[in-house]
């Protein structure tokens, strides 16, 4: 599938107020992903967040909750955990904290400020590496397998 065939946005309707919100960019990638474990989204008319059960896709009329259930019905509990926010936090912490400690220890022969800056740098690098491992090593491949598409923005 070419990048030009991937939609840049999609609209959903808040069933309570009847108004539509157009979602694009990173927000669209998240709301279109049935494995994102998203529970709430934004209504641009109400200017507030509501549960996904209160929204339906404008083009199909299907609630976002039903869309998630339909496209993720074949996901195992392990796959759901490995694409969850809980696992993201766990993998980030498992890499960021040891990286910060290692940087602090490696800079033991310099002043405390340099050690602290090094530890902060280790924390940032470890967190970034953890997020990349989560996204590229777990979330994307599992979502591709469960949903059957490389990019969930193409799902209907």
Image (spheres, grey):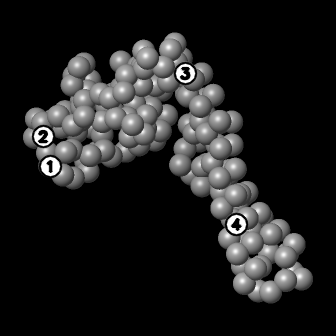
* Mark 4 vs mark 1, CA separation in Å: 41 Å
Residue 46 is tagged as 1
- Element marked by disc 2: loop
Q: Which residue is mark 3?
A: 150
Q: Contact, CB < 8 Å: mark 1 with mark 2? A: yes
Q: Spatial distance from mark 1 to mark 3, Cα to Cα?
A: 33 Å
Residue at x-position 57% and y-position 39%: 83
Q: Judge the density around disc 3: few (<14), some (14-19), many (≥20) Cα neighbours within 10 Å.
A: some
Identify the residue position indicated by label 4 in the image.
121
Along the polypeptide, which appears first: circle 4 or circle 2? 2
Instruction: Describe residue 78's horizontal placement relative to residue 1 as left or right.
Output: right
> In the figure, is residue 61 to the left or right of 102?
left
Residue topped by disc 2: 16
Check contact, mark 4 vs mark 1: CB within 8 A: no
Q: Nearer the viewer, mark 4 or mark 2?
A: 4
Q: Could you give the CA–CA distance between mark 2 and mark 3, rounded to whole angstroms?
A: 33 Å
Comparing labels 4 and 1, the label whose residue is closer to the camera: 4
Closer to the observer: label 2 or label 3? 3
Above-or-below relation of 105 to 44:
below
Is the residue under label 4 in contact with that under label 3 (CB below 8 Å)? Answer: no
């Amino acid at each position: 599938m070419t990048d030009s065939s991937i939609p840049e946005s999609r609209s959903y309707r808040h069933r309570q107020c009847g108004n539509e919100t157009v979602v694009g960019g990173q927000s669209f990638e998240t709301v279109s992903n049935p494995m994102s474990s998203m529970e709430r989204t934004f209504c641009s008319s109400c200017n507030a967040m509501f549960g996904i059960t209160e929204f339906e896709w404008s083009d199909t009329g299907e609630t976002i909750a039903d869309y998630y259930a339909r496209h993720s019905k074949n996901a195992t509990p392990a796959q759901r955990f490995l694409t969850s926010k809980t696992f993201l936090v766990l993998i980030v912490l498992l890499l960021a904290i040891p990286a910060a400690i290692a940087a602090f220890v490696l800079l033991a022969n310099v002043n405390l400020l340099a050690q602290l800056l090094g530890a902060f740098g280790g924390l940032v690098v470890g967190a970034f590496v953890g997020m990349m491992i989560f996204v590229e090593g777990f979330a994307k491949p599992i979502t591709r397998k469960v949903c059957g598409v490389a990019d969930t923005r193409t799902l209907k």
